[in-house]
Image (tube, rainbow, N blue to C red):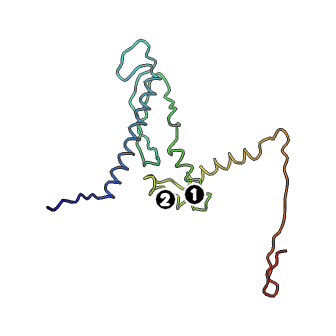
Amino acid sequence: MPHEIVSFDEPKLQEYLGELVRKTVEDTLNALLDEEADQIANAGRYERTDERQAYRSGHYKRGLATTSGSVTLNIPKLRGATFASKVIERYQRWETSVEEAMMEMYLAGVSTRRIQDVSEILWGASVSPATVSKLNRKAFGAVDEWRRRTLLGEYPYVYLDGTYIKRNWGGAYECV
């Protein structure tokens, strides 16, 4: 009695799972933003209370590139209070790990134009070469600030210097 062999399209399954993860990240971030808006307003959406400090005034959409792919965020707008999220910085367009990956690529010698192509493939969102340059200026600024910090206390250290030369003298190698 022949048994049917179960087969599946692995690339299609991976695509489905990737989209499922991306959608879950998007839904979770939007839920967190809504919860923050409720806390700032001191009332839920459409809730009427005397303690209310602000009113919902719709939302605006903003893209965010994450390691799971590009997500669309619904940033709440409030009347009577300023919405400042602790989840996402005001002008943040890239997840921190994505920014770090772009900086590492740049430091490894990948051109800003090539980083633009790679970001489109990996995260589904293209990054301009100017953005890569801006991120690296920010990183180099932090490194320079660390280098120029004042040092308090004593720091013992030892300098060593040397040269190791391997020479061939008549078929035999000598180290000088």
Residue 82, position in %: x, y?
50, 26
Give amino acid for label 2: Val
Up the image or down, 29 lies above or below 44; here it is below
Q: Which residue is mark 1?
A: 105
First in sequence, mark 2 or 1: give its number: 1
Residue 153, position in %: x, y?
84, 39
Q: Is residue 82 left or right of residue 59?
A: right
Helix, strand or loop under label 2: helix
Are there few (<14), some (14-19), or many (20+) residues within 10 Å of tag 2?
Answer: some
Asked which quadrant contains residue 28, the reply is top left
Mark 2 touches mark 1? (CB < 8 Å): yes
Q: Is residue 47 left or right of residue 104?
A: left
Q: Which residue is mark 2?
A: 118
Considering every residue shown, the one lying at the far top of the view is 50
Give amino acid for label 1: Met
* Residue at point 77%, 45% (across, down): 148
